Amino acid sequence: MKLRLINLLSVMMILSAVLFQGTCTGGEIKHIKTSYGEQQSASGKILVAYASLAGSTAEVADFIGRILSDNGAVVDVKPLKEVGDPAGYSAVVLGSAIRRGKVLQEVMDFIKANKPKLENIPVSYFIVCMTLKEKSEENYKKADAYLDPLRAEIKPVDSGLFGGKVDFSKLDFMEEMIIKYFIKESEGDYRDWDAIKTWAIELLPKLRQAEKNN
Ligand SMILES: Cc1cc2nc3c(=O)[nH]c(=O)nc-3n(C[C@H](O)[C@H](O)[C@H](O)COP(=O)(O)O)c2cc1C
């Protein structure tokens, strides 16, 4: 009887989490929207757009935007939901948090909705996830596979795979239950800012080269 009740509660929690994914959040989340650099050069503007539920991917996107700009690019950093259309950008960097083994649905929706435009400009992906809390070869393989559905739509110039952050105060009730009791993850920040910086610095010439080739 007790076991049945626990099973029923588990099913209810999962159902609610699936139904309400992304509709309610815990603490205040920063939706970063900013621009870096001044449009002087002939090189076009780069869009860094992100999908984030608890804010850690937004901070990574902002950091990537700043590094690209420090290295000469003009960059807009925006939540993906506010982008609508990538027209006017010379390259797009798309970032997503990972939830239950997948990138957030809005990333795939954006790619499908804008596929013809994205086919004509360089695109790069990055993900932020707890799989890379430990940087083993096996974990990189697993994290890399999260991007396969996106790659099947648009082949990226490069993919950044980064460790993430869990902060219970930023999660809604259901997400907190899932991460605590199903995924059994504790709080921690595993974002490696040096690795993210290196990736962003190396990404810029790849995007510029791909722009020329298009
Ligand atoms: C409910 C929930 C499910 C998650 N599922 C996964 C997962 O399947 N794989 C993974 O690597 N990380 C998973 N994570 C970790 C997040 O990807 C990580 O905390 C990331 O930094 C969150 O990004 P955000 O703060 O931008 O939402 C999960 C986190 C939560 C809260």
Image (spheres, rainbow, N blue to C red):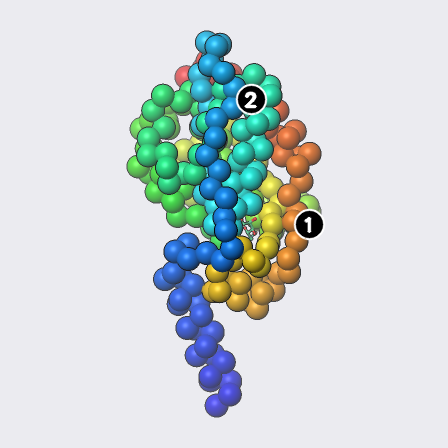
Image point (52%, 19%), residue name: 37
Q: Residue furthest bottom?
A: 1
Image point (65%, 29%), residue name: 198
Decide: few, some or many residues near mark 2? Use Cα within 10 Å; few <14, some 14-19, many ≥20. many
**Spot occupied by residue 2 in the image (x, y as percentages of width and height):** 51, 88
C-alpha distance separating marks 1 and 2: 29 Å
Residue 84 lies, with reference to residue 201, above or below; the image says below
Image point (38%, 44%), residue name: 106
Q: Which residue is mark 2?
A: 69
Q: What amino acid is at disc 1?
A: Glu
Q: What amino acid is at disc 2?
A: Ser
Residue 71 marker: none
Q: Which residue is mark 1?
A: 134
**Spot occupied by residue 151 in the image (x, y as percentages of width and height):** 45, 37
Q: Is residue 99 visible?
A: yes
Q: Is residue 147 visible?
A: no
Lateral position of residue 111 relative to residue 68, left or right:
left
**Spot occupied by residue 186 in the image (x, y as percentages of width and height):** 64, 60
**Spot occupied by residue 63 in the image (x, y as percentages of width and height):** 58, 33
- Mark 2: which secondary structure? helix
- Mark 1: which secondary structure? loop
Residue 7 lies, with reference to residue 59, above or below; the image says below
- Residue depth check, mark 1 versus mark 2: number of the one nearer the observer: 2
The residue lying toward the viewer, choosing from 30 and 197, is 30
Decide: few, some or many residues near mark 1? Use Cα within 10 Å; few <14, some 14-19, many ≥20. few
Number of marks in picture? 2
Locate the C terminus and report the quarter of the image it occupies.
top left
